[in-house]
Every structure is written in C-alpha cells, then in structure tokens.
C-alpha cells in the first residue's frame, strides 16, 4: 500500500476534522437517518469507485479512528461511523452504517461501517444484533 505524502496526510486530517464537526452539528439537529442522508448527499457526481475500494475504505477507517482518538469530546463509534460515511461518500465508495445492540450482560449499543458486507470500522464482537442499517 502506498504511503501518503505529508501534504496528503494533512489534507486528509483536515477533511476528517471537517466531517467530524459537520457530523456533530448535524446530529444535534436531526434524526440519524436524516444526518446520514445529508452526509451522503454532498458526494460529488457519481463516479466509478476504484477497484481497490475495500482497501481504501479500511485505510480511511483506520485514519478516522487514529485521528479522532486524540480529539476531546464524544468521538465514540457513532461519530466515527458518521465521519467515515462522509469520507466514503465523497469518494463514491458505497457503505452501510450499521447500528447494533446487545442486552447481556448489560445493554450496549454499537455502530460501525461496512463496505460490500465487510466491516471497515470495528464491528465489535459477535454479540451485537443488527438493529438498523443505513
């Protein structure tokens, strides 16, 4: 896998931070379905995704996780998933935001992103049942 130049890494960082701010702001104002649709609607005109779109989606997922782990505030799974959804849409890479939950031993909800049925953000363990796919 080719490494990004320092300039490209900085640009990706700025893009992630902008998507983070946009996602947090949108989530305070609208239901999750509306937020996801809005993040995807800003994508450029449909273009053919790269043949290695799964690898690119995973690379972006790692970048989102690394950068947001250093941010103050709520950067848990839902925000990370929204940010990654925005980045993938801007690259015409199809994705599905999944929200799941488990009830034992305690109730816990989790969100992650998939591309072509493969997780590109940590899906947690297999105890999470799917509740919603957006």
Image: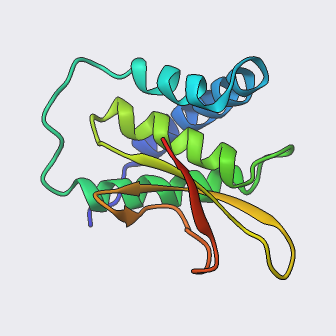
Residue placed most toward the observer, 96 or 70: 96
Residue 82 image position (x, y, % from top left): 58, 40
Residue 63 image position (x, y, % from top left): 52, 55
User: Left or right: 116 with respect to 83?
Assistant: left
Residue placed most toward the observer, 94 or 72: 94
Residue 77's place in the image compared with 103, above or below, is above
At 36% from the left and 30% from the top, the residue drawn is 90
User: Left or right: 8 with respect to 106?
Assistant: left
User: Left or right: 98 with respect to 49?
Assistant: right
Q: How is the image coloured?
A: rainbow
At 16% from the left and 47% from the top, the residue drawn is 50
Residue 55 image position (x, y, % from top left): 29, 62
Residue 6's place in the image compared with 46, above or below, is below
Residue 28 image position (x, y, % from top left): 79, 23
Residue placed most toward the observer, 55 or 117: 117
Q: Quadrant of residue 126?
A: bottom right
Q: Quadrant of residue 119?
A: bottom left
How many numbered tags mark residues here? Answer: 0
Q: Quadrant of the N terminus?
A: bottom left
Residue placed most toward the observer, 102 or 56: 102
At 87% from the left and 75% from the top, the residue drawn is 106
At 28% from the left and 58% from the top, the residue drawn is 116
User: Left or right: 114 with respect to 36?
Assistant: left
């Amino acid at each position: 896998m080719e490494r990004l130049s320092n300039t490209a890494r900085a640009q990706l960082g700025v893009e992630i931070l902008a998507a983070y701010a946009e996602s947090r702001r949108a989530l305070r104002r609208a239901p999750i379905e509306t937020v996801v649709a809005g993040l995807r609607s800003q994508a450029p005109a449909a273009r053919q995704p790269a043949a290695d779109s799964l690898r690119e989606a995973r690379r972006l997922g790692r970048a989102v996780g690394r950068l947001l782990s250093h941010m103050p505030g709520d950067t848990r799974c839902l925000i990370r998933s929204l940010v990654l959804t925005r980045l993938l849409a801007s690259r015409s890479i199809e994705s599905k935001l999944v929200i799941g939950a488990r009830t034992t031993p305690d109730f816990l909800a989790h969100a992650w992103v998939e591309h072509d049925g493969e997780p590109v953000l940590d899906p947690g363990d297999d105890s999470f049942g799917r509740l919603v796919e957006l």
